[in-house]
Image (tube, rainbow, N blue to C red):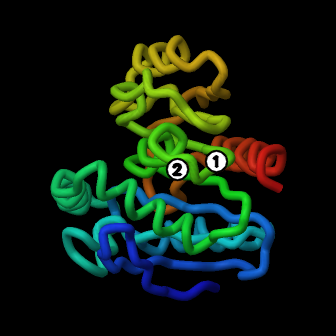
Amino acid sequence: MGETIQLKAADGFNLSAYVAGPADAAKGIVVVQEIFGVNHHIRAVADRFAAQGYAVVAPALFDRVERGVELGYTQADIDTGRGYRMKLTDADVIKDIEAAAEHLSGKKLGIVGYCFGGTVAWWGATRTTKFAAVSAWYGGGVAGTRDERPNAPVQFHFGEKDASIPPQDVDAVRAAQPKAEIYVYEGAQHGFGCDERGSFSQPDYDLAQKRTLEFFARHIA
């Protein structure tokens, strides 16, 4: 189990973050939240990576809008989370993931994100130079920024039946980023990697997690 700490971003803003894993690890991972905050699920994700020997930080990106956000997965929660996300600027999001990376200074770093965080993880490749590997799970904003140039190897995970990421978006990402690893999970829906959502798919999660861990092992372990 981890603990909650405070980070300071480059603009002086203080935000909370969940940290887990051995502090003296040579390798680290920044875990980027969905639109539901650093909730029980994201903390569990961080703990799983920590169990693999990584020092892990999950920054609370919604702290700039409201502190302590932990949402569930009802439609009301989705609407609330989207409202918080719309109040964030992309530039502030980058400051906060860089603050998480700074906490892990001296380690070789990966970044992984889910949903909103999947898009942010992609930006971690293109808008910073802090990360040596990026794994982006069902990021809805990836297609819209697909022409950005990554500074690190990138791996994408998409659900074939994701209502918010149509196949043509995945095709557009594949065309724009021919060097990226892109996996599409047959029949999987948005959020297939979250075991607290109705769309969870154990086999697809297991495979995507295996691929993510192998990807990080190649590039940052």
**What SS does tag 1 mark?**
helix
Residue name at image x 49 percent, y 40 percent: 122
| Type of amino acid at the residue the image marks with label 2 | Phe
Q: Nearer the viewer, mark 2 or mark 1?
A: 1
Left or right: where does residue 183 sit relative to residue 16? right
**What SS does tag 2 mark?**
loop
Looking at the rendered image, the quarter that the N terminus falls into is: bottom right
Inter-mark Cα distance, 2 to 1 = 8 Å
| Type of amino acid at the residue the image marks with label 1 | Tyr
Left or right: where does residue 113 sit relative to residue 107? left
Q: Where is residue 64 in the image (x, y as percent from the top left)?
A: 24, 70
Q: Where is residue 6 in the image (x, y as percent from the top left)?
A: 43, 84
Mark 2 and mark 1 in contact? Answer it, CB < 8 Å. Answer: yes
Residue 50's label in the rendered image is none
Residue, disc 2: 200
Can see residue 110?
A: yes
Residue name at image x 37 percent, y 36 percent: 140
Q: Position of residue 40 (x, y in %)?
A: 47, 74
Left or right: where does residue 108 sit relative to residue 193? right
Residue 205's label in the rendered image is 1
Depth check, front residue: 130 or 83? 130
Residue 148 vertical position relative to residue 47 in the rendered view, above or below = above
Residue name at image x 68 percent, y 47 percent: 132
Looking at the rendered image, the quarter that the C terminus falls into is: bottom right
